[in-house]
C-alpha cells in the first residue's frame, strides 16, 4: 500500500565532497523514527577518496546518472504518495521531485530553501548539484533534464532564503520568473509564500531544504563554516532553524506536503573525528 518512502541517498559526487556521504547518514539517524514509513537506500559508488573525472562538462557525470537511475527505479518500485529524502548533495532532489510532479499531474508546487539558485549549466559550473532545479525545469544539463518526464512549472517554484546570485544565474531565474522570498522577509511573515500557494492553487507541495540556507553563525555544518575556511568564495545563508520551521508549519495549514528533501549537510567535525579515529591502530589491529 503506498505511503511515505524514506529514501537515504548519501550521494557525494554531485558536489565532489565525501563529507556529504556521512552527512546523509547522520541526517537519517537524527530524524524522528516512524515505523509506518517505507525505508530504502540508493547504492552509492565507493570508495570516497577516488579522483572524479570531468565528463562532458560535469564531474562524475556517468556515476551521477547511474545513481539517478537507481533512485528513480527504487521510487517507482515503491510508488509512494510521499517521499522524504536524506542527502547527500542537492542533486538528490531530482528523482523524487520528478516522480512526485508526474504523480500529481504536473501540478506539484516546489518550495526551494537554498542560498543558491541551483539553475546552473555545465558551461557555468562543473558540479551537477548546482544544476538540479534547472534540470527539473527542463534546463540545467540536457542529459539530466531528459530524465524528468514532466518538467515542473516555473510558476510553481518559489525560492526561500536565496542570497547573492551570479549574473548568469540571475538571468536564468529572471527568464523563468521564479518568485523569491528573502530571509529578512520570512523572518517577519510567511505571507508571501502563502499568497504564492493561493495564487497558483497549489494543492501538493515538495520542499527542498539545502542546509546552506542557514546562517553559519548559528549552525556550523555548512559550506561557509568549514574549519580553516573554504578555498573559494561561498554565499552564506542567513536563516535560522526557527524561521525555516515557522514557514513550513505555516505552509502546512494551506497545502499537503508530499515531498521533503534535506541536503548539503556537511558535519565537518564528525567527519574529521571519524578520519582521526580511523588512523588509530587500536581500532584496526590487535595491540599486544
Image (cartoon, rainbow, N blue to C red):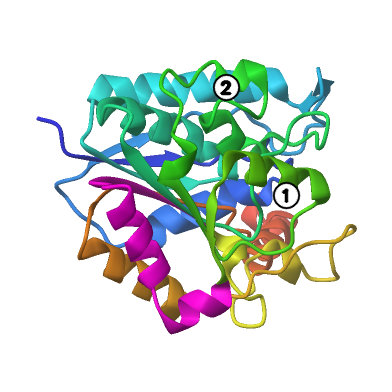
Q: CA distance from mark 1 to mark 2?
A: 20 Å
Residue drawn where x is 58% and y is 71% of the image: 214
For the record, the magenta segment spans 183-209
Eye-nearest disc, 1 or 2: 1
Q: Is residue 72 left or right of residue 182?
A: left
Q: Is residue 172 left or right of residue 26?
A: right
Of label 1 and label 2, which has the lower sequence position? 2
Work out whether 252 lies above or below 259. below
**Could you say whether the residue bearing mark 1 is in a helix, strand or loop?**
helix
Within 10 Å of disc 2 (Cα), the crowding (few <14, some 14-19, many 20+) is many
Residue 109 circle label = none
Q: Is residue 288 visible?
A: no
Q: Quadrant of the N terminus?
A: top left
Percent coordinates x, y for residue 258 in the rendering? 27, 45
Residue under circle 1?
Answer: 170
Residue drawn where x is 56% and y is 79% of the image: 184
Work out whether 95 lies above or below 209. above
Work out whether 204 lies above or below 239. above
Residue under circle 2?
Answer: 145
Q: Is residue 191 left or right of residue 232?
A: left
Residue drawn where x is 64% and y is 69% of the image: 237
Relative to the observer, which residue lies in front, 154 or 218?
A: 154
Percent coordinates x, y for residue 275 in the rendering? 71, 57
Work out whether 262 lies above or below 15. below
**Could you say whether the residue bearing mark 2 is in a helix, strand or loop?**
helix
Relative to the observer, which residue lies in front, 98 or 67?
A: 98
Q: Quadrant of the C terminus?
A: bottom right
Amino acid at each position: 500500500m503506498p505511503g511515505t518512502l524514506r529514501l537515504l541517498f548519501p550521494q557525494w559526487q554531485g558536489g565532489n565532497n565525501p563529507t556529504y556521504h556521512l552527512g546523509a547518514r547522520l541526517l537519517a539517524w537524527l530524524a524522528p523514527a516512524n515505523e509506518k514509513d517505507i525505508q530504502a537506500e540508493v547504492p552509492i559508488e565507493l570508495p570516497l577518496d577516488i579522483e572524479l573525472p570531468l565528463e562532458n562538462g560535469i564531474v562524475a557525470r556517468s556515476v551521477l546518472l547511474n545513481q539517478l537511475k537507481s533512485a528513480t527505479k527504487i521510487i517507482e518500485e515503491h510508488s509512494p504518495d510521499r517521499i522524504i529524502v536524506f542527502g547527500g548533495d542537492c542533486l538528490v532532489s531530482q528523482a523524487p521531485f520528478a516522480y512526485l510532479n508526474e504523480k500529481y499531474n504536473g501540478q506539484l508546487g516546489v518550495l526551494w530553501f537554498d542560498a543558491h539558485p541551483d539553475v546552473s549549466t555545465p558551461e557555468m559550473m562543473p558540479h551537477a548539484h548546482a544544476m538540479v532545479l534547472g534540470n527539473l525545469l527542463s534546463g540545467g544539463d540536457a542529459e539530466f533534464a531528459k530524465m524528468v518526464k514532466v518538467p515542473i512549472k516555473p510558476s510553481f517554484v518559489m525560492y526561500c532564503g536565496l542570497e547573492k546570485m551570479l549574473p548568469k544565474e540571475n538571468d536564468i531565474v529572471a527568464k523563468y520568473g521564479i518568485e523569491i522570498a528573502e530571509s529578512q522577509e520570512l523572518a517577519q511573515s510567511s505571507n508571501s509564500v502563502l499568497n504564492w500557494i493561493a495564487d497558483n492553487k497549489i494543492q501538493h507541495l515538495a520542499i527542498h531544504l539545502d542546509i546552506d540556507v542557514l546562517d553559519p553563525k548559528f549552525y556550523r555544518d555548512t559550506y561557509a563554516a568549514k574549519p580553516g575556511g573554504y578555498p573559494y568564495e561561498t554565499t552564506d545563508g542567513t536563516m535560522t532553524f526557527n524561521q525555516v520551521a515557522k514557514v513550513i508549519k505555516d505552509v502546512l495549514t494551506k497545502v499537503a506536503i508530499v515531498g521533503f528533501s534535506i541536503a548539503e549537510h556537511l558535519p565537518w567535525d564528525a567527519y574529521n573525528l571519524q578520519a582521526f579515529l580511523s588512523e588509530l591502530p587500536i581500532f584496526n589491529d590487535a595491540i599486544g
